[in-house]
Image (tube, grey):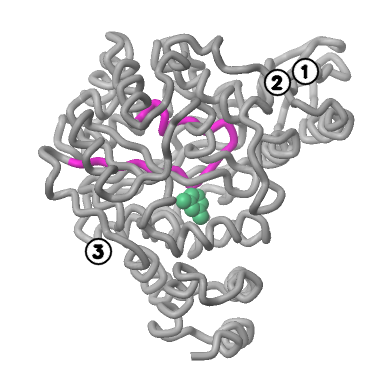
Amino acid sequence: MNFVDIIRKKRDGFELSKEEIEYFAFSAADGSVPDYQLSALLMAICFNGLTERETLDLTNAMARSGDMADLSAINGITGDKHSTGGVGDKTTLIVAPVVASCGIKIAKMSGRGLGHTGGTVDKLESIPGFGTFLDSDEFISIVNECGICVTGQSGKLCPADKKLYALRDVTATVDNVSLIASSIMSKKLAGGAECIVLDVKCGSGAFMKDEKSATVLAEKMVEIGKGAGRKIAALITDMDVPLGHNIGNSLEIIEAVETLKGNGPHDLTEISVSLSAKLLELAGKGTFEECKGIAMTKINDGSAFEKLCEMVSLQGGNEEYIRNTDLFPSAKFIYNVIMPENGYIVHMDTAGIGSVCASLGAGRMKKEDVIDSSAGIVLRKKTGDHAEKGDVIAVLYANNDSLFESAGQRFLSSLKFGNEKTEFKPLVLNTVE
Ligand code: URA
């Protein structure tokens, strides 16, 4: 098969055959096609889309591009969770231990930062020693031992998605509904869990900017999951505003730990509890409302926090950093962003804020870039908050202070100010089951 013909066929708007889609996925996995040709095909897909059939074929091919985890050796119900990506979205670090502390086995494969969004694997790697390069056997043995494991795709699981994900991040080919659906669902199918909750983000900081497109994505993924025999549901949640206050890798671990100790911000707590409850409901633990109560209890009695400590330790991480988050090194430099006028923040371009955060070192501009764990942003004010001229509305953290001038300006131009308080939307906008 000739890869140039496949690129040309998609460029000209034709449907690719199952064999061509498989050739694409398998050669991404084995490295036999160069990055520039894979990137060209990704761009052609962004322009011309994939049909339902092509999306399903790509999902299955990527899922089969490496090992399929066999979770049959795990006692009990297995669960998994995935977000379509947002800014300040550290819900996995909360949902996974909450649900695991209820006895559901969490076998989760996570991603790195993508575009303007952060990734759980990058966040976890800010914990010294934490291992995200696990193969299927290690993955399963950790789930068996403590009921929870969050791994990257560095082992033999879903290598095609691992390759394409990294290329999409740096070639502006992320926000295509079929590429997102197949990327997420290939990992969920290969990961093998029976119950899956999806967090489909919607708004200025999400890949899906409005509820309609988020619903299309949610329905596509739920359908793929059901077709594969999984119990699956998606919550469509607000990402018009960053989630919580901290954005950036170790800053997000710190905020997740606070949330697991019951001291988290309201939005992060509510979305995390809702996602946990939906997963618990799928696993047969009760109604959604009952499961919300169970999730809150696991936060309030400290068992979810202890579960995170256990997982960190079994994955080689230094648990002391979770018990005492002051151990995380702080960035060398800080920069205060100042409110330019009296009034309310009426809108945040959340993707813009995610990009500012990445430019401080928290994300990648090129595939090979190394993440700066301590770089990031702490928001003091968000949409709907009032501030006086001269107030500090955000603090930027970086290890290179020459980045601040442009980052500070770009941060401010991501905000809109006004005299009227913005009406709040619900945090959970819809559920697709
Ligand atoms: N998360 C993924 O795993 N893949 C995407 O394409 C987007 C978010």
Q: Which residue is mark 2?
A: 331
Q: Amino acid at mark 2?
A: Ala
Of the two numbered discs 3 and 1 on the same chain, state the one appearing first in sequence. 3
Between 181 and 6, the one nearer to me in the picture: 6
Q: Amino acid at mark 1?
A: Ile
- Give me the C-alpha separation between circle 3 and circle 1: 49 Å
Please give the name of the residue rendered at 71% of the width and 48% of the height, measured from the top-left corner: 365
Magenta range is: 78-95
Q: Is residue 359 above or below residue 418?
A: below
Crowd around label 2: few <14 · some 14–19 · many ≥20 (10 Å): some
Q: In the image, is the residue at mark 3 within 8 Å of ligand 1 by its beta carbon?
A: no
Q: Which residue is mark 3?
A: 227
Please give the name of the residue rendered at 20% of the width and 25% of the height, measured from the top-left corner: 102
Q: Are marks 2 and 1 in contact (CB under 8 Å)?
A: yes
- Give me the C-alpha separation between circle 3 and circle 2: 46 Å
158 falls in the magenta region: no
- Give me the C-alpha separation between circle 2 and circle 1: 7 Å
Please give the name of the residue rendered at 66% of the width and 20% of the height, measured from the top-left corner: 378
